[in-house]
Structure formats: structure tokens, C-alpha cells
Image (tube, rainbow, N blue to C red):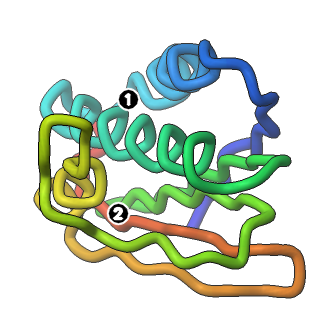
């Protein structure tokens, strides 16, 4: 699996937009539908980490011929949990689940990593 450079994020509200732009630039070899799913999953995981986690937040992407792994790490040990959608949100991890082959998380000494694996076609 080929690792794409890791990116460490600040805490400003414009970080998801900057990460979307960074990911689109890096993943231009993916088919447009796959790219849209990958950017959506990345955006949701980053938004969750910034809203519910603790800094620093790091993003790591890795890909091979048929898979893209998206990882978002933050310093909070609190697990990411899907919740029923309501007017204030709750759709993020449901979207990650719908767009990903599988997703999960693991805790480590410095927080947690939430990851998602997507099936992609490399052009």
C-alpha cells in the first residue's frame, strides 16, 4: 500500500475545506465518483475530529490498486460513535458507513484513530 503524505491540521474552522482541496489534488488519479466518496469520507472524519476530538488532528491517506485507506487521528480517547441524525447533525459517521467498504477505530496512548477503507478505481 502506498502512503500519501500525512497532514497535520490546526483547529480553525476552515480546516475541512483545506483538507478537501489537499485530498482532491492528491487523488486526481481516482475516478470522479470514487474521488467524491473519498473526499466526503475525509471531510466527515476531519469535521468529527475537530468538533468532538482534541488537537492535534492528523490525516493519513494510503492507497493500492483497489483500496483507499483514510485515517484521521486526534488526541481524544473518547470513541467516535454513530448517533441518530437530527436537526443539529449526526449524519457524519452514517455517511462514512454508507460510502466505505468498512470503517472502524482504535485507541492508542495519544488518543484515537478513526479509519475508513474505500474501494476505488485507479485511473
What percent of the width, then of the height, locates residue 7?
76, 38
At x 20%, y 31%, the residue is 31
Q: Quadrant of residue 71?
A: bottom right
Q: Quadrant of residue 101?
A: bottom left
Q: Quadrant of residue 99?
A: bottom left
When the figure is inspected, residue 18 is found, relative to residue 55, above or below; the finding is above
What percent of the width, then of the height, locates residue 35?
28, 32
When the figure is inspected, residue 40 is found, relative to residue 19, above or below; the finding is below
What percent of the width, then of the height, locates residue 52?
57, 53
Label 1: which residue?
29
Q: Residues within 10 Å of mark 2 (few under 14, many from 20)?
A: some
Disc 2/disc 1 C-alpha distance (Å): 13 Å
Question: Which residue is more in the foreground, 74 or 90?
Answer: 90
Q: Residues within 10 Å of mark 1 (few under 14, many from 20)?
A: few
Relative horizontal placement of residue 73, taking residue 96 as reference (left or right): right
The image's mark for residue 21 is none
Question: Which residue is more in the foreground, 45 or 122?
Answer: 45
When the figure is inspected, residue 11 is found, relative to residue 62, above or below; the finding is above
Helix, strand or loop at disc 2?
A: strand
Quadrant including the C terminus? top left
Quadrant including the N terminus? bottom right
Relative horizontal placement of residue 68, taking residue 120 as reference (left or right): right
Mark 2 or mark 1: which comes first in sequence? 1
When the figure is inspected, residue 9 is found, relative to residue 59, above or below; the finding is above
Helix, strand or loop at disc 1?
A: loop
Amino acid at each position: 500500500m502506498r502512503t500519501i503524505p500525512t497532514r497535520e491540521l490546526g483547529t480553525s474552522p476552515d480546516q475541512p475545506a483545506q483538507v478537501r482541496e489537499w485530498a482532491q489534488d492528491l487523488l486526481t488519479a481516482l475516478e470522479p465518483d470514487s474521488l467524491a466518496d473519498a473526499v466526503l469520507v475525509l471531510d466527515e472524519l476531519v469535521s468529527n475530529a475537530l468538533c468532538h476530538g482534541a488537537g492535534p488532528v492528523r490525516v493519513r491517506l494510503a492507497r493500492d490498486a483497489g483500496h483507499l485507506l483514510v485515517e484521521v487521528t486526534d488526541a481524544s480517547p473518547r470513541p467516535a460513535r454513530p448517533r441518530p441524525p437530527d436537526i443539529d447533525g449526526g449524519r457524519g459517521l452514517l455517511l462514512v458507513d454508507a460510502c466505505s467498504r468498512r470503517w472502524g477505530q482504535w485507541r492508542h496512548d495519544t488518543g484515537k484513530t478513526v479509519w475508513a477503507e474505500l474501494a476505488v478505481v485507479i485511473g
